[in-house]
Image: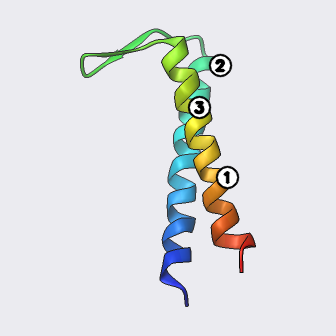
Amino acid sequence: MNHRKEIAKFACGVTAWEAIVHLSFACCHSLPLKLCRITLTKRLNTTQVIVPALTSSLLAYYAWVRE
């Protein structure tokens, strides 16, 4: 068993979860949101959707597609 691919599968799930959470913030119109002295604006939230989604896609490619 390739441990690196198993870790990539786990990280893929974590980053996908993060993208979904931030997408739900945008869909529920709950922005701006202040957490731990950081204001989550629409622009920052958009970044927090795109970057984890791309990261999750790359990790999925590495973990399941790439031989």
Residue beneath the point at 67% across and 52% down: 57
Residue beneath the point at 25% across and 22% down: 36
As helix, strand or loop, the secondary structure at mark 3 comes to helix
Residue beneath the point at 57% across and 37% down: 51
Real-space CA distance between mark 2 and mark 3, rounded to the nearest whole angstrom = 12 Å
Q: Could you say which quadrant of the image residue 9 lies in?
A: bottom right
Real-space CA distance between mark 1 and mark 2, rounded to the nearest whole angstrom = 22 Å
37 up-or-down from 4: above or below = above
Q: Which residue is mark 1?
A: 57
On the image, the x and y values in percent for residue 67 come to: 71, 81
Q: Amino acid at mark 3?
A: Val
Of residues 39 and 24, the one nearer the viewer is 39
Count residues near mark 1 (Cα–Cα under 10 Å), then give few for <14, some for 14-19, many for 20+: some
* Residue projecting furthest to the left: 37
Q: Amino acid at mark 2?
A: Cys
Residue beneath the point at 62% across and 33% down: 50
On the image, the x and y values in percent for residue 35 come to: 31, 20
Real-space CA distance between mark 1 and mark 3, rounded to the nearest whole angstrom = 12 Å
Rendered image coloring scheme:
rainbow
As helix, strand or loop, the secondary structure at mark 1 comes to helix
Q: Earlier in the sequence, mark 1 or mark 3?
A: 3
Q: Amino acid at mark 1?
A: Ser
On the image, the x and y values in percent for residue 62 come to: 64, 67
11 up-or-down from 43: above or below = below
On the image, the x and y values in percent for residue 33 come to: 41, 13
Horizontal side of 49 relative to 66 (left or right) equals left
Q: Quadrant of the N terminus?
A: bottom right
Q: Could you say which quadrant of the image residue 65 lies in?
A: bottom right
Count residues near mark 3 (Cα–Cα under 10 Å), then give few for <14, some for 14-19, many for 20+: many
